[in-house]
Amino acid sequence: HQVDDLARVRVVLLPVGRTSTSRFGRYCDVLRQIRHIDFSDLDAAHLPTASSSAFVHQRGVWDKGQILFSYVDSSYHAAPWDTFQAHRQPLAVFGICYCPQVDDIVS
């Protein structure tokens, strides 16, 4: 483990619909290349204001910080010690689908 492994958000990647195993694997490979997102790249409208932020005493944290990611796929199974080690718990799920024939994915 590296020191920053403990600060990463664990994301579970799941296939959705009729996504083939090979396509799902390729899409996962692409996502796994995204190891972090800089706060400065986020839309400022979605960031907390200085008065509502947990970092109210740390000016500039939203300009310099990052969200770090680690990914596990659908074969992930929680281990008994995951409950005691917060960095091992998945905090997000990304559903990956392939739908070339669909104009509107929401409908």
Image (spheres, grey):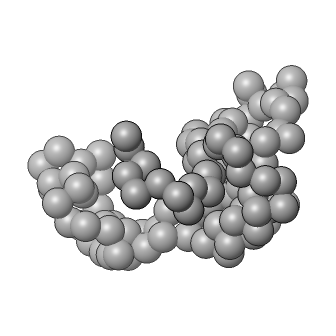
Number of labelled discs?
0
Residue at image position (15%, 54%) is 49
**As drawn, which residue projects farthest toward the front?**
101
Residue at image position (50%, 62%) is 67
Residue at image position (29%, 62%) is 58
| Image coords of residue 99 (percent x, y) | 57, 56
Assign the N terminus to one quadrant of the image.
bottom right
- Asked whether residue 29 appears in the rendered view, the answer is yes
Horizontal side, residue 38 vs residue 3: left or right? left
Assign the C terminus to one quadrant of the image.
top left
In the foreground, 92 or 17:
17
Horizontal side, residue 103 vs residue 50: left or right? right
| Image coords of residue 17 (percent x, y) | 65, 41
Residue at image position (69%, 36%) is 89
Q: Quadrant of residue 76?
A: top right
| Image coords of residue 64 (percent x, y) | 38, 75
- Asked whether residue 5 appears in the rendered view, the answer is no
In the foreground, 47 or 54:
47
Quick check: 44 above or below 76? below
In the foreground, 94 or 34:
94
Q: Quadrant of residue 5?
A: bottom right
Quick check: 98 above or below 26? above
